Image (cartoon, rainbow, N blue to C red):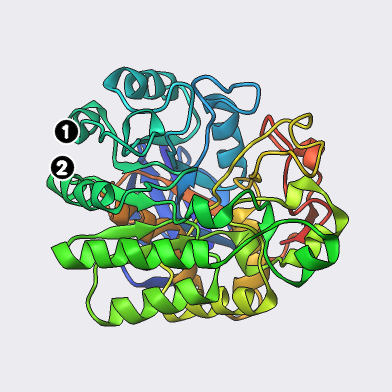
């Protein structure tokens, strides 16, 4: 079958393409990229005039809740949500039931994902049972199909354990992703510790928790000359630490999520648990620092940390679990807040959402090279829609962008 995407604004940062072009696809592979490509009567044409054509988006940090928590989400509903948001590949975190700490669980995910609408790449757990104690067998996880390891949702408390994990992950060519949080510092806090928590009289989460573990992980990696990836950066201090150590040559990469460059702790005045996540929404100075880090290259990836929870679980502000969904809004929020405001270019958007996540995970894709899979996202920068949680494909509806008008 031959397909041609015509007259679209094609952006491919790897091949330095940023112009109006056609893309010819034959049997699922990119066959040609150029101007006014010839077509015959058997070619199926899609007119992409006024639309942007980029490599498929890769979200390297989501929670599919499958196995064991499928009342919140499962591999199929998460993939439906991803496809609706222009996301063609996802990496799923290991805090499932059971955790992804064995080849059997990895196999379950990959077998089920064969019929999903997106490519699914499992992340294995750093420690058995996400306990923070005994390391999993990284070689087994790699052989089973994992592309990275993380105890996301919890930190690895012991520094020496984390140091060993960084070394073992490098030996097995696995990305190692750190959830930077000190639970002793958090001490039961449920929102950012600051002016809003003081007014509400609610126990806050001190920013030093994230900053301290961010610095710890970087120094543990730097001492060994090995890579480390910092998950969901939310504080201005963490951005500064990463920026400084990158300049020194440390092999540190990091990610942030759309809510951290658009929303602040002021949302918590409503006492709505859909605005509670971990790390929490912080202050305007942090939002500004995150945007600066995205623009200057300090922050490598935009991800969602898609974390579904049921309405019942989110019904009580004080006891609800942390987390928000984001697969269906991440591109739209990025286009609305960063691209359409001129803060980032089309090329930078592709780097942040398509290229860098795959590079960090060591997986193929992120470009429109001849012969590569026709893994493509097409979107409008101008069409507006309002986020209605009930219309989202995700099984859970806990979006912090509800009611917002996005492009």
Q: Is 84 left, or right, of 54 in this rendering?
A: right
Between 378 and 46, the one nearer to me in the picture: 378
Residue found 51% across the figure and 24% down from its top: 66
Between 186 and 125, the one nearer to me in the picture: 186
Secondary structure at numbered mark 2:
loop
**Rendered view: 376 above or below 288:** above
Where residue 365 sits in the image (x, y, percent)? 32, 50
Residue at the spot of label 2: 172
Residue 35 visible in the shown view? no
The reply to whether callout 2 and callout 1 are in contact (CB within 8 Å) is: yes
* Mark 2–mark 1 distance (CA, rounded to whole Å): 6 Å
Where residue 332 sits in the image (x, y, percent)? 65, 58
Where residue 245 sits in the image (x, y, percent)? 31, 77
Residue found 60% across the figure and 41% down from its top: 307
Q: Quadrant of residue 331?
A: bottom right
Q: Residue furthest right?
A: 270
Between 301 and 254, the one nearer to me in the picture: 254
Residue at the spot of label 1: 139
**Local crowd size for mark 1, using a 10 Å CA cut-off: few (<14), some (14–19), many (≥20):** some
Residue 407 visible in the shown view? yes
Where residue 68 sits in the image (x, y, percent)? 53, 19
Could you tell which of marks 2 and 1 lies nearer the N-terminus? 1
Residue found 30% across the figure and 76% down from its top: 246
Between 18 and 391, the one nearer to me in the picture: 391
The quadrant of the rendering that contains the N terminus is top left
Q: Is 378 left, or right, of 221 in this rendering?
A: right
């Amino acid at each position: 079958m031959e397909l041609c995407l015509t007259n679209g604004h094609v952006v491919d940062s790897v091949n330095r393409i940023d112009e109006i072009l056609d893309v010819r696809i034959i049997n699922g592979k990119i066959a040609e990229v150029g101007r006014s490509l010839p077509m015959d009567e058997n070619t199926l044409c899609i007119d992409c005039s006024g639309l942007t054509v980029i490599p498929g988006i890769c979200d390297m940090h989501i929670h599919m809740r499958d196995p064991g928590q499928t009342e919140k989400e499962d591999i199929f509903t998460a993939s439906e949500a991803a496809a609706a948001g222009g996301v063609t590949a996802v990496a799923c975190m290991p805090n499932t039931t059971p955790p992804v700490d064995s080849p059997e669980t990895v196999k379950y995910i990959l077998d089920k994902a064969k019929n999903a609408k997106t490519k699914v790449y499992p992340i294995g757990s750093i420690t058995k049972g996400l306990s923070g104690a005994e390391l999993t067998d990284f070689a087994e996880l790699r052989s089973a199909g994992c592309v990275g390891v993380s105890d996301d949702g919890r930190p690895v408390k012991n520094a020496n354990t984390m140091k060993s994990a960084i070394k073992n992950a490098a030996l097995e060519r696995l990305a190692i992703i750190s959830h930077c949080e000190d639970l002793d510092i958090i001490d039961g806090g449920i929102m950012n510790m600051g002016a809003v928590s003081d007014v509400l009289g609610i126990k806050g989460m001190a920013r030093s928790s994230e900053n301290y573990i961010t610095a710890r992980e970087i120094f543990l990696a730097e001492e060994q000359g090995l890579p480390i990836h910092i998950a969901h950066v939310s504080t201005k201090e963490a951005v500064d630490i990463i920026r400084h150590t990158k300049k020194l040559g440390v092999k540190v990469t990091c990610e942030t999520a759309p809510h951290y460059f658009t929303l602040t702790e002021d949302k918590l005045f409503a006492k709505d648990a859909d605005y509670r996540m971990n790390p929490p929404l912080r202050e305007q100075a942090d939002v500004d620092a995150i945007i600066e880090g995205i623009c200057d290259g300090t922050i490598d990836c935009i991800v969602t940390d898609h974390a579904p929870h049921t309405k019942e679980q989110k019904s009580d502000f004080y006891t609800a679990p942390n987390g928000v969904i984001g697969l269906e809004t991440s591109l739209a929020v990025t286009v609305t807040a960063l691209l359409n405001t001129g803060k980032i270019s089309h090329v930078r958007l592709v780097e942040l959402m398509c290229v860098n996540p795959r590079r960090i995970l060591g997986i193929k894709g992120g470009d429109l090279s001849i012969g590569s899979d026709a893994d493509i996202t097409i979107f409008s920068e101008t069409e507006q829609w309002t986020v209605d949680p009930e219309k989202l494909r995700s099984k859970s509806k806990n979006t912090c962008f509800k009611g917002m008008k996005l492009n």
